[in-house]
Amino acid sequence: MVSIQSHRKDEHLSLAKKFHKTTSTAGFDQIRFIPNTLPEISFADVDISTKLGELTFDIPFYIEAMTGGSEYTGKINQQLATIANNLDLAMAVGSESVALREPKLADTFETIKATNPNGFKIANLSASATIADVQTAIEMIDASAIEIHVNVAQEVVMPEGDRHFNWIDNIKKIVNHFNIPVIVKEVGFGMSHESIERLKAIGVQYINLGGKGGTNFVQIENFRRPNKDMSYLEDWGLTTVESLYEAKSVSNINIAAAGGITTPLDIVKALYLGADVVGVASTILSSLIDNGAEKTEEILSEWIYGIKAIFVMLGVRNITELRKTDIVIDSELQNYLEQRNIK
């Protein structure tokens, strides 16, 4: 018999696919690069590798946390791990808390360790997890880093969600205890510079902004509510672009960005705005379900080419040069930045 927690994992996956958007609403359309008509560069000159603190990524995007915890989502994890292995992409798993409650489900996460033993893998647990839980989650997939997710908006709408959110002290304990990078991750509602500063003050060195514009967990959890009565919160949060601008005012913080990444151009814009690496979830999941693993791998391979092509069109050799290029932004984003006193 399928448990309630395992069934919820299948529900989340199904609804994420149901509500998937083919175009981003994360704010990237509010930014345009100024093209370089005479770039004087070749593809061989371009280096798209990046560093997130002490972590090196040969490719500046990775497969963001999505799934695991049921038979079906375990198969999805195995397919994602195969793609990650073949393309040398880093990969995060969905929350492993279900496997801590039901150890028989651990294999739905462990499959990525068996499929991609030498790959860069990122574990995932809630900010309320114990030290022992975090250790188990890391060992479960042989992780090189762990995402500790903060998801107030999702939890308050989720029918069976948490109702207590005292996270700061626990996050500090986790950060201080583990030697591998601990990435504090929002799940689609963005981060203000005030929140980032609070995290930095307790020793957090890595954040994932998880901006609005991609998978909407308020929409997903509200759909699961009997009366579907909290749709008024579906626009809650800051977009990925707004969150990246918020993070610019915080020094010495390593930034991953996710939320509404649908094209290589979105990735390059996120890198320009200060993301050290970019996570992609819903776009990959939707392709995997619709097109299969082989076609999805082909699409992501084309994305790698697309990122290099944009660098060439801008006449930049690396991310450092990319951030020196010129852009224009639209009036709505300009208005937001003025109200928030962000330069």
Image: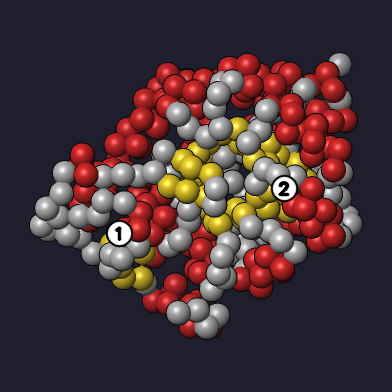
Left or right, 267 with reference to 224: left
Kindly identify the amino acid type of the residue bearing the numbered disc 2: Ile
Left or right, 230 with reference to 293: right
Q: Secondary structure at mark 2?
A: strand
Kindly identify the amino acid type of the residue bearing the numbered disc 1: Glu
- According to the picture, the residue beneath numbered tag 2 turns out to be 148
Q: Secondary structure at mark 1?
A: helix
320 lies above or below 43: below
115 lies above or below 80: above
Q: Position of residue 272 (x, y in %)?
A: 38, 59
Identify the disc placed on residue 295.
Answer: none
- According to the picture, the residue beneath numbered tag 1 turns out to be 321
Residue ID at (88%, 55%) = 163
Considering the image in quadrants, where does the N terminus appear? top right
Q: CA distance from mark 1 to mark 2?
A: 31 Å
The colour scheme applied to this rendered structure is secondary structure
Left or right, 171 with reference to 195: right
Q: Position of residue 27 (x, y in %)?
A: 46, 61
Q: Is residue 287 visible?
A: no
136 lies above or below 188: above
Residue ID at (68%, 48%) = 182
Q: Nearer the viewer, residue 61 or 69?
A: 61
Q: Position of residue 210 (x, y in %)?
A: 59, 53
Q: Position of residue 65 (x, y in %)?
A: 62, 38
Left or right, 69 with reference to 212: right
Q: Nearer the viewer, residue 189 or 204?
A: 204
The crowd level at tag 2 (other Cα within 10 Å; few <14, some 14-19, many 20+) is many
